[in-house]
Amino acid sequence: MIDLKRPAVRSDEMKVCEAPVAVDEARYPYGTRIHLEKEELEKLGDQVADLSIGDRVEFSAIAEVTSLSANSDEYGSSASLSLQIQQMEIGGPVSGGKTTVRDALSTLRGKPL
């Protein structure tokens, strides 16, 4: 596995045009967070039911490459890749927390799963 965590940036290295962000948001690059809604959580069912905040999981996915981009100008160069996740599977938690996805979905439905 490749760690995508960004190195800490010293305040004297920050660019003037950069907007301040919360510390957690700056640890990993934009676009590396996946947000699943109620419908997707229900589809994944038992794979996510016992996950809690702070758990670390391994997941696999099948995605389609939807765009590729490369740019170079007087300020430097950049490149990007966009993926549309189409299928995914999530492994069990490494460690358990208190409130689980099962609890959250149960609260939304007003009844236990």
Image (cartoon, rainbow, N blue to C red):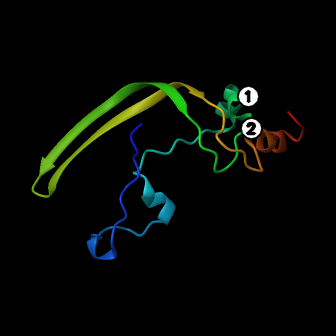
Vertical placement of 101 versus 29: above or below? above
Question: Disc 1 marks which amino acid?
Answer: Asp
Identified at 64% across, 45% down, the residue is: 55
Q: Residue at x 27, y 71 (%)?
A: 13
Expressed as whole percent of the image width and height from the top left, the position of residue 27 reads 44, 57
Q: Nearer the viewer, residue 99 or 82?
A: 99
Q: Nearer the viewer, residue 48 or 91?
A: 91
Residue at horizontal 50%, vertical 60%? 24
Q: Residues within 10 Å of mark 2 (few under 14, many from 20)?
A: some
Taking the view exactly as shown, the residue that stands out farthest to the left is 74
Q: Residue at x 28, y 76 (%)?
A: 12
For residue 93, side relative to residue 113 (left or right): left
- With 85 as the anchor, is 65 left or right in this view? left
Q: Determine the residue located farthest toward the right in the rendered image.
A: 111
Query: Label 2 sits on what residue type?
Result: Asp
User: Circle 2 sits on which residue?
Assistant: 50
Q: Position of residue 17 (x, y in %)?
A: 29, 69
Task: Count all numbered tags in the image, as a single digit.
Answer: 2
Give the structural element (helix, strand or loop) at label 1. helix
Residue 14: image quadrant is bottom left
Question: In the rendered image, which quarter contains the C terminus?
Answer: top right
Coordinates of residue 42 in the picture (x, y in percent): 71, 30
Q: Are marks 1 and 2 in contact (CB under 8 Å)?
A: yes
Circle 1 residue: 46
Q: CA distance from mark 1 to mark 2?
A: 7 Å
Q: Is residue 62 above or below residue 76?
A: above
**Can residue 18 be seen here?**
yes
* Left or right of residue 57: residue 23: left
For disc 1, the neighbor class at 10 Å (few under 14, some 14 to 19, many from 20) is some
| Label 2 element class | loop
